[in-house]
Image: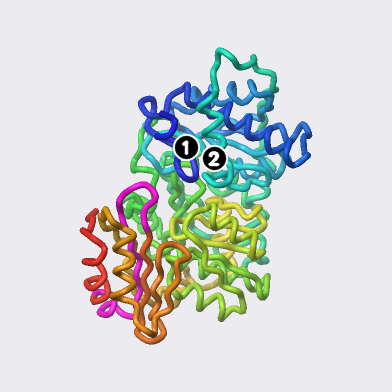
Amino acid sequence: MLGRVFKAYDIRGTYPDLLTDRMAWQVGVGTGRFVLEVAKATGENTPMMRTVVVGRDMRDSGPTLTEQLIDGLTRTGVSVIDLGLVDTPMIYFAINHLGCAGGVMVTASHNPPNWNGFKIAGPKARPIGEATGLADIRKHAAMADMRTIDEPSGRVEQRDLWKPYAKHVRHFVREGGPATRNKPLKVVVDASNAMAGTMIPKVFGMKGELLEGYLDCGIELITVNMDNTSGEYAHAPNPLVKSNMRMTQEAVIENDADVGFCFDGDADRCMVVDDEAMIIGCDHLTALLATDALTRHPGAAIVYDLRSSKAVEEDVRKAGGKPVRGRVGHVFMKAAMAEHDAVFGGELSGHFYFQDNFNADSGAIAMATVLGLLARNKKKLSQLIKPIARYTQSGELNFTNEEPQEAIHKLEEEIATDDAVVDNLDGITIDCFQKEGWWINVRMSNTEPLLRLNAEAKDRQTLNRLVDRVGPLLGKRVEH
């Protein structure tokens, strides 16, 4: 049963049929034993390296699962600092702020409310995935037996870290210098009836009042879908689905706002809407924020998801930075950030990574950074994005295929010309941009018999021909 909820990078499933209270207890035991193994192996067997922080999102199953998780943790002798109802980036902050062994967030991110799960991080908020400890946690969890394990011996302490966390996030508003705008920013925030409904008032204030002294031009914050106590959702907490962005777009138009933000379930991701109510591609936003960061960190590395527009690489180079293509997924993005000493990173899924945030991702800091950038620019957001969105993109297209590896080999044989640059960093990328004005990336899904295609070209006609040519080689198109 445990095998069905352990994924490549986290643990999640529908509650209580796939993910049960007993499993939460087992995950606690497994995580505790893993923490103690790491402490012993590294020789850092101090009280804080035997302590983890725990938080949860707004789901109805959260309190029970958290209680069982903590019981399992403390039965191994590990102590727990319970942060209560928080966004996932708070866990990353708390691990580093307190200097403890790691943390567990009880969340299923953007999944529907009947789902739940656990995101686990290690020292310095390094992600724990299948290859970096999750397999060991699963093994320990599978062997956990309440009949043979000791009574709880670890301590449990409740702690409120909102004040230092909020100060940390707000620092990013001021990072680039004082405002040049002469009128307040009008900002829409759609909390998706999820954890941003708790985070926004504590970090920014319900009307933006907590940004006084950080945002010289002033701010008018307009919030929608803030209630996360009823279990009712105005839309699913997944901003990657365009229909879920509609209320953010409508609020931007209705209020003549400068920008809109829509957060996912645990508020580690956000999507941004410009002043014309257009959804900004996360790769285009990566290019904009990277260029801004490079004004303060000349020559620095910028990590970007390899599905991103060519404009990201081009604009980073133009700004004097070092562009670094990264594999898809927070485990790989954070590793690339550390390896290359990058100041910033962006992923197509809405995760944005910051060196000054322990290389971790944060929806709140992404929002703070965009607000700071707009305060320092007299141009509208749509005007800043337009020159970046200069190429035509397919978006991610999915194809069912029971023989994905064979299809990828056939694709390379038939599509890659002598002029193409081919690499296998993540799936296969075939790049003919210089000669023919297009590139593609095809990756296998980790969980389904699917091939995922991302393509870009210099014009719509070239892109359409490309997709018509490549699609049949990948299988049957999945329409959404």
Is residue 182 visible in the rendered structure shown here? no
Residue 221 in view of the camera: yes
Q: How many marks?
A: 2
Instruction: Give the crowd class for mark 2: few <14, some 14-19, many >=20 residues within 10 Å.
Output: many
Q: Is residue 275 magenta?
A: no
Q: Decide whether residue 446 is among the magenta residues.
A: yes
Residue 335 in the image: above or below residue 146: below
Q: Position of residue 194 (x, y in %)?
A: 45, 39
Residue 388, above or below 63: below
From the top left corner, tell me how far across and down residue 141 is, in percent: 53, 28
Viewer-nearest residue: 115 or 205: 115
Lateral position of residue 51 relative to residue 142, left or right: right
Where on the picture, by quarter, is residue 261? bottom left
Whole-percent x, y for residue 49 in the image: 73, 36
Crowdedness of circle 1 by 10 Å Cα count: few (<14), some, many (20+)?
Answer: many
Residue drawn at (59%, 32%) of the image? 31
Specify the quadrant of the image occupied by residue 140. Answer: top right
Disc ID at residue 11: 1
- Secondary structure type for disc 2: helix
Residue labelled with disc 2: 134
